[in-house]
Amino acid sequence: QVQLVESGGGLVQPGGSLRLSCAASGFTLDYYVIGWFRQAPGKEREGVSCIMSDGERYFADSVKGRVTISRDSAKNTVFLEMNSLRPEDTAVYYCAGSKGAGAYTFCQGYVPVTYWGQGTQVTVAS
């Protein structure tokens, strides 16, 4: 079965950190650009960070300097490390994958998504 499965979300205090994981099954992540998107209630979906197979990365201005994205080919997994979390980071975070796109174009939503994960809730609150 082809799927992306996110994990690692939860409740964290402002200033805290979380590490989200996006594990793929049924296909090899190495051949895809993988991105993390988020959507908060009443807001549009936002591309947070995306990574290409050659390592090219994109970060949204809202998270630049606070987030790192990496991929582990052996685990067929992409990670999103988030630090200095703020209440405005609260959202459902989804990972997604596609082919034929750069990190920027994928995160900006210019390319159709082939695979979506089910999402993981991140809540930043005291």
Image (cartoon, rainbow, N blue to C red):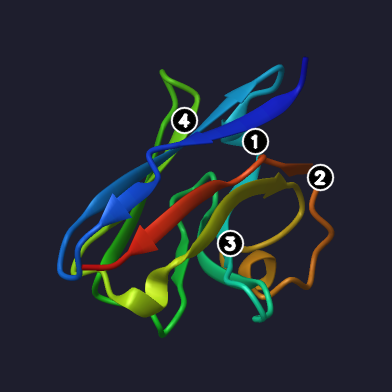
Q: Secondary structure at mark 3?
A: strand
Decide which of tag 4 and tag 1 comes sooner along the chain. Answer: 1
User: Is residue 118 shown above or below 62?
Assistant: above
User: Do the residues under discs 1 and 2 have CB atoms within 8 angstroms?
Assistant: no
Could you tell me the amino acid type at mark 4?
Answer: Thr
Crowding around mark 1 (Cα neighbors within 10 Å: few <14, some 14 to 19, many 20+) is some
Tags 3 and 4 in contact by the CB under 8 Å rule? Answer: no
Q: Residue at x 40, y 45 (%)?
A: 9
Q: Nearer the viewer, residue 100 or 95?
A: 95
**Label 3 to label 4, Cα distance in Å?**
16 Å
For mark 2, what is the residue?
114
Residue 39: image x %, image y %? 61, 68
Q: Is residue 110 above or below residue 4?
A: below
**Of labels 1 and 3, the one closer to you:** 3
Marking on residue 37? 3
**Rendered position, 6 above or below 121:** above
Residue 115 screen position, x and y as percent? 76, 41
Q: Amino acid at mark 1?
A: Tyr
Of residues 61 and 20, the one nearer the viewer is 20
Residue hosting label 4: 77
Answer with mark 3 or mark 4, whichever residue precedes in sequence.
3
Amino acid residing under circle 3: Phe
Give the total of numbered labels.
4
Contact, CB < 8 Å: mark 1 with mark 3? no
Residue 49: where, in percent of width, then height?
48, 64
* CA distance separating discs 1 and 2: 12 Å
* Disc number lying in front (1 or 2): 2
